[in-house]
Image (cartoon, grey):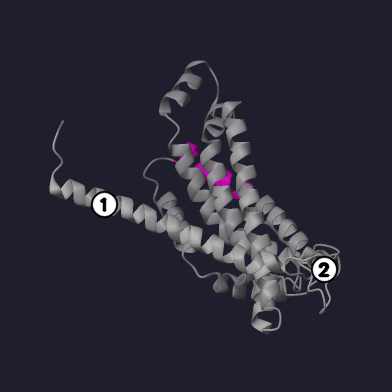
Amino acid sequence: MMKKKPFDIFLGVIVKGSALITAGVLVFLVGYILVKGVPHLKPSLFSLTYTSENVSIVPALITTIIMTFLSLIIAVPLGVFTAVYLVEYAKRGNKIIGIVRVTAETLSGIPSIVYGLFGLLFFVTYLKWGYSLLAGAFTLSIMILPLIMRTTEEALMAVPDGFREGSFGLGAGRLRTVFKIVLPAAIPGILSGIILAIGRIVGETAALIYTAGTVAQIPQNALSSARTLAVHMYALSSEGLYTNEAYATAVILLVLVIGINTLSAFIAKKLTRG
């Protein structure tokens, strides 16, 4: 048996220690939210109508689901098809492609409040959509578009070239190869990007305050103003009167994110096996 060097032992301790610290922080955060929030979950929080007495989370929960759905409908096709073009159709070494990739990476690092101000100026004011679900969804779709595009691009590049060559050798065209061979093989990576995008949508506040507004009611249509769970939690905590209800909202938000991630992972596993 080979004797370990002191430096190897030191690196092993650092790696294991880092993993334990990360896991500990995660457990602490989740435990803190549950301890603070679960005791304050009560039936009045799940009323269909928000009032100053019950501060119901149901309108915000429904708005969160609708906002996530609308944002993904806009961003996912654009991001995936852009990535397909960059990887499968664009010529290698193209300067324009390099500019697009640098721009996407730059957009990923822009603070969300900047997106919110852009959405306020363009969607809310210039297009006259007002504070609405539609303005919020388009703003969020611009925010998550670089993330979906880059993760899809990486997933497509991870597909072995042998898959493409085998398909071409059997007489399939490029379009058929992309949609029948490459994209199915890249689905797990694409879904990973979508899961990250969902997490950003669900947890976003700054951009939505400027675009979707903070009205605590179930939206009647796409041009209705409403608040998501994250905005709802921010509003409750900032008022200082409903701190306990804000912790309860955090529990619901945590459960929602875990549920969405679990469902996405299940779908990815089913599609991979298929």
The residue that mark 2 highlights is 44
Reply yes or no: does residue 270 show up in magenta. no
Q: Residue at x 59, y 65 (%)?
A: 33
- The answer to whether residue 132 is seen in the rendering is yes
The residue that mark 1 highlights is 13
Viewer-closest of 68 and 47: 47
Quarter holding the C terminus is top right
Q: Tag 1: residue type?
A: Val
| Residue extending farthest top | 170
Q: How packed is label 1: few (under 14 Cα within 10 Å), some, or many (20 or more)?
A: few
- Magenta residues span 77-90
- The answer to whether residue 126 is seen in the rendering is no
Q: Main secondary structure of the magenta part?
A: helix
Residue 221, compared with residue 267, is above or below; it is below
* Secondary structure type for disc 2: helix
Q: Is residue 240 left or right of residue 155?
A: right
Residue 25, compared with residue 206, is above or below; it is above
Q: Residue at x 32, y 50 (%)?
A: 16
